[in-house]
Image (cartoon, coloured by chain):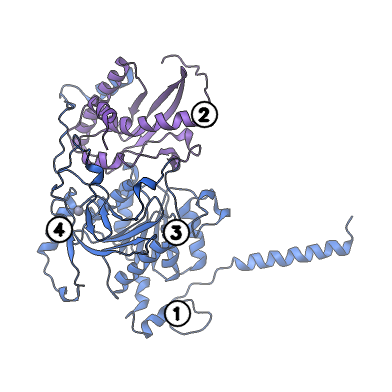
Amino acid sequence: MSTVEELEAIVAKLESKLSALTQKNVPRGKIQQMSSEVVDSNPYSRLMALKRMGIVNNYERIRDYTVAVVGVGGVGSVTAEMLTRCGIGRLILFDYDKVELANMNRLFFQPHQSGLSKVEAAAETLRNINPDVDILTFNYNITTVENFDNFTNVLNTSSITNGPVDLVLSCVDNFEARFAINTACNEFNLTWFESGVSENAVSGHIQFIVPGETACFACAPPLIVASNIDEKTLKRDGVCAASLPTTMGIVAGFLVQNTLKYLLQFGQVTHYLGYSALTDFFPTMGLKPNPNCEDSHCRLRQKEFVAKPKTEMAVEAKEEEKPIHEDNEWGISLVNESVEEKEQVNVSEGVQLAYTLPSQSSIAECEEATVSDDVSLDELMAQMKSI
Amino acid sequence: MVDESTRKTLSNIALLKTKAGPRDKELWVQRLKEEYQSLIKYVQNNKDADNDWFRLESNKEGTKWFGKCWFIQDLLKYEFDVEFDIPVTYPTTAPEIALPELDGKTAKMYRGGKICLSDHFKPLWARNVPKFGIGHAMALGLGPWLAVEIPDLISKGVISYKEKTESGK
Ligand SMILES: [Zn+2]
């Protein structure tokens, strides 16, 4: 049995623990105006110092901007945190996934958040870090028909002034979602960054996409940074993908750095920046759109861009720009592709196309599904059910 | 890489013509009809060749697909629910086929039970837009996945045979 004194000591200890915990959870009040005053209570003093040093002309403008982060996983969550700490005006988060213990090799999320939706868990943490940032969350899969319209509607109307968002950041981990973002941004003329980390976790990239002006995600097969791994030694048995917090953190850093440069207009924004972890190699290049891009809205934006009077070309970084469209000089076809695996096409030093496309597919052996108009869809559905 | 067996599988499935996705309204109906015709024929061929391995149906709009697939080992039939959505960017991007009941049971899956495809699937699909359809995604994606993963999961004791009460095959 414990004595009264012992119990009193335990109570006192628990009370102090409790008060420490409740104190911790009081977020600071909102700050109406960013100040450059250097005092320990000003969360923006070091950012506003960028202005004093002449790096950024008008840092406070960051509060006018809205950035959409699509995918709040290993790259997206860190991206969102950086933008929050930088004091972005509004952040819009999209993800349909939940936090899992299997995510704990990455940054940002904590074990106690397991089971929560990623967007909700992220919003709570971010609001706590910086209550000045307005955070909107959408917990759904953007690639499905039922959500895509809402997704594009949000992108078009959710800026601080109820207009289109200033920038979309793709932090998704799959081809389908990237393509959905590409479709939306081409259609509604939204500027965006694509980002990615390879499935073997040792390379990554960011790509800046201004519809009509730079290559879109559909202009060519995906670009991959050469990892300098001998394909024969790369084992994929038993796992889909690996991930490292380091590579993801680096890619998120690239992404937000270029976001800041784009929004606050300092430095240069690179069209493509790659990262090869094994060799510490960082290829960069400019990318022109493909005039024959499959996406009709990309072609439309290209026409608009050509028609637009060019005013400030002099400021543009002089880079060697390469169109990455294909004219099928490799002559790949489905039927004769014993050579296909060797066909790695270098786009720039250390950057390759993930695969090549034929200009005309040549499967001659298969017949086509011929649809006669006298069969209705309902009949076909019934027929399928009755097999 | 298209090897001999893949080519044989492919020659069994009729190609599609209409490049249309679920946002394309009337053209999508046309595409859906082609999908169904190609699938009906493929399933019928499988049945005739004593190699019947899946059934699929969709919602009215053809945007959500569901059904069963099965794998036979030692005369026992292991059956699984299959489901997938047709993405807005279909047919440029393939559907992501999922076996929800195996979610979390194998590392060869993404979240939600989406199967992990081989490195060859995406290039092959991309080269054959819009000719490849749902039947091709099943044959080139799910078929090889089942053939590799199910025997492995059975041998590890992760899945075991369950007597089905329903009639039919
Ligand atoms: Zn394009």
What chain does badge 3 belong to?
A
Q: Determine crowd level at label 1: few under 14, some 14-19, many 20+ residues with C-alpha closer than 10 A.
A: some
Q: Measuring 46% from the left and 28% from the top, which residue is drawn there?
A: B151
Quadrant where the C terminus of chain B is found in the figure? top left
Closer to the eye: label 4 or 2: 2
Q: How many marks?
A: 4
Nearer the observer, B18 or B14: B14
Q: Of helix, strand and loop, which one carries label 2? A: helix
Which chain can be seen in blue? A
Location of mark 1 (residue): A46
Quadrant where the N terminus of chain B is found in the figure? top left
Q: Of helix, strand and loop, which one carries label 1? A: helix
Q: Of helix, strand and loop, which one carries label 4? A: helix
Dividing the picture into quarters, in which one does residue A81 lie? bottom left
Residue type at tag 2: Ser
Location of mark 4 (residue): A302
Residue type at tag 3: Ser
